[in-house]
Image: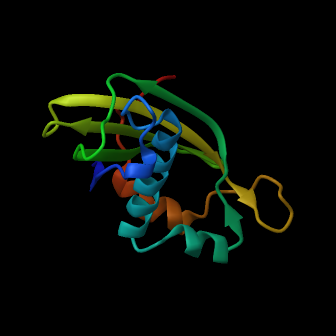
Amino acid sequence: MKFSCEMTPRYKDIDRMGYVHNSVYQVLFEEGRIAMTASTGYTYGDLEDDGVLLPISEAHYYYKVPIFYQDKIKVYIWINYIKTFSMKICFRITKDDDKTIVAEGYSIHAAVDAATKEFTEVPQNAADLWGRYIEKEKIGN
């Protein structure tokens, strides 16, 4: 199952050409990822309280068409896999009532112990809750 949320670009996100600046896409994906995890009842804050961090170890984005100021967009987020020490989260942004794919991408997150900064296992309770968003559709490698 994919999680989705609607967003509208802010004026400060727009570059001189009138497009949403490419650096903003990472923020849109992050906001969607945070909303997805919160929807399960186990948030990033809960994860950090449990002593685990999920820094991005790899990220890829594929830009297809621009987003303009006040475009209504939808961000889809799903988890391609959860492994022992990492997870891959995929993203897709659409507009025009899902008729146009704006961008796609993915990020791989390493599970890291907050105290030691060493790799650690993705907590089983997080994997169980977030597992509802596992989809076999993948973007990139």
**Looking at the picture, how far across and down is residue 15, in whole percent?**
45, 36
Q: How many labels, in total?
A: 0
Name of the residue lying farthest toward the front: 16
Give the residue displayed 44% in from the left and 24% down from the top.
62
**Looking at the picture, how far across and down is residue 97, in whole percent?**
13, 40
In this rendering, the answer to whether 63 lies above or below 47 is above
Give the residue displayed 32% in from the left and 35% down from the top.
67
Give the residue displayed 42% in from the left and 28% down from the top.
139
Q: Residue 19, located in which quarter of the rendered image?
A: top left
Give the residue displayed 33% in from the left and 28% down from the top.
66
In this rendering, the answer to whether 54 lies above or below 138 is below
Of residues 60 and 52, which is closer to you in this image?
60
Color theme of the render: rainbow
**Looking at the picture, how far across and down is residue 122, in whole percent?**
62, 57
In this rendering, the answer to whether 68 lies above or below 128 is above
**Looking at the picture, how far across and down is residue 79, in whole percent?**
43, 45
| Image side of residue 113 versus residue 79, left or right | right
| Image side of residue 22 versus residue 112, left or right | left
Of residues 138 and 45, which is closer to you in this image?
45
